[in-house]
């Protein structure tokens, strides 16, 4: 089934900033295997991105098959970049299984995704790969690694680990099997814009998003596997807040549904524009949604609301220190 959402005019913004052009863009919410898509000619010059929603299990090959179908569909629909969620490779039943199924960046699975990106002719954001790093032999722990694939590979290792106990959702102690990343990474230039890499729980720390924005990010990515309690309460409001405060697009590919008897995820993958409007979101279950990235709109908004010029670090310090 195919569903379309058209972003309505922001009347308040038009009154506030009379010279600001509000683009009328069609975006798409789709289940796998849509047959057709209609895009207005005025928006066809803008880069198209695809946000994929999946239900990973401990079966790595089946997960790859599912993700590959969505990536090929994204390429067929004209996307230049496809985003996959955190734990796209697998979601295990316990830390021991997680460590057993993990691989190094140079392993078989990343090689398959590199070939897939080359075959489809697009960039891939692999939202959270269970990486055996160079310190694997010493630590026997892994990294939650966001990998951006094209002709070159960019990586970011999740810096904020999710060690929480939410009533009704069950405990999560990511640090049992995972090491925190040592640093943020500079935004990466892609056909859709400059992308700042993050992962899931990172979205709760605005200092990270501010640092990426000050380093030149135009798109922030939060591939995720949100739970059933925190999802309805916090997912959309956090993503919209990060978009508004940084004046960036936010792309959030999410896990959905039941992965196995011990875990389920909220879903609701979405794209948020710099004004804070949700311009695309996935339906229930595995599938994809598409959105066009309008960097002219982003730049106009930043000119009319120059919040970064108005910051007062003399009063409260630099909440997000620019990356070196």
Image (tube, rainbow, N blue to C red):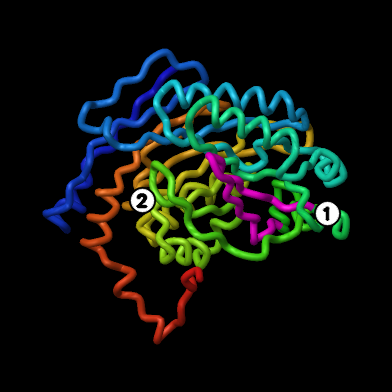
Which residue lies under the disc numbered 1? 136
Q: Nearer the viewer, mark 2 or mark 1?
A: 1
In this view, the residue in front, 290 or 181, is: 181
Residue 226 on the magenta segment: no
Horizontal and vertical percent for residue 27?
A: 35, 31
Between disc 2 and disc 1, whose residue precedes? 1
Q: Residue at x 62, y 65 (%)?
A: 183
> Alpha-carbon neighbours of circle 1 within 10 Å: few (<14), some, or many (≥20)?
few
Task: Give the prevailing secondary structure in the magenta stretch.
Answer: strand
Asked if residue 16 lies left or right of residue 52, the reply is left
Total of numbered circles in the picture? 2
Residue sticking out furthest to the left: 18
The residues bearing labels 2 and 1 have C-alpha atoms spaced at a distance of: 40 Å
Give the structural element (helix, strand or loop) at label 1: helix
| Mark drawn on residue 276 | 2
Magenta-drawn segment:
142-162
Give the structural element (helix, strand or loop) at label 2: loop
Give above or below for 117 relative to 313: above
| Mark drawn on residue 308 | none
Q: Residue at x 21, y 61 (%)?
A: 304
């Amino acid at each position: 089934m195919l569903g379309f959402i058209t972003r309505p005019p922001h009347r308040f913004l038009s009154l506030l900033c009379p010279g600001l052009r509000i683009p009328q863009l069609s975006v798409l919410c789709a289940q796998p295997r849509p047959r057709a898509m209609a895009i207005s000619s005025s928006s066809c010059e803008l880069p198209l991105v695809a946000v994929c929603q999946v239900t990973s299990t401990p079966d790595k090959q089946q997960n790859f098959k599912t993700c590959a179908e969505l990536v090929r569909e994204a390429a067929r629909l004209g996307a230049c970049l496809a985003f996959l969620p955190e734990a796209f490779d697998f979601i295990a039943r316990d830390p021991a299984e997680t460590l057993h199924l993990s691989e190094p960046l140079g392993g078989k699975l990343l090689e398959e995704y590199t070939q897939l990106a080359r075959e489809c002719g697009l960039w891939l954001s692999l939202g959270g790969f269970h990486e055996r790093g160079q310190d694997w032999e010493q630590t026997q722990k892994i990294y939650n690694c966001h990998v951006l694939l094209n002709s070159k590979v960019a990586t970011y290792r999740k810096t904020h680990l999710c060690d929480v106990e939410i009533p009704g959702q069950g405990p999560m102690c990511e640090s049992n099997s995972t090491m925190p990343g040592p640093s943020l990474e500079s935004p990466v230039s892609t056909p859709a814009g400059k992308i700042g890499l993050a992962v899931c729980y990172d979205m709760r720390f605005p200092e990270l998003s501010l640092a990426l924005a000050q380093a030149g990010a135009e798109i922030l990515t939060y591939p995720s596997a949100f739970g059933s309690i925190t999802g309805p309460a916090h997912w959309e409001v956090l993503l919209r807040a990060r978009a508004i405060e940084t004046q960036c697009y936010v792309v959030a590919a999410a896990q959905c549904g039941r992965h196995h008897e011990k875990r389920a995820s909220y879903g609701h993958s979405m794209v948020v524009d710099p004004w804070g409007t949700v311009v695309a979101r996935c339906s229930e279950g595995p599938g994809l949604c598409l959105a066009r990235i309008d960097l002219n709109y982003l730049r106009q908004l930043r000119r009319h609301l120059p919040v970064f010029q108005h910051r007062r670090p003399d009063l409260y310090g630099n909440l997000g220190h620019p990356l070196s």
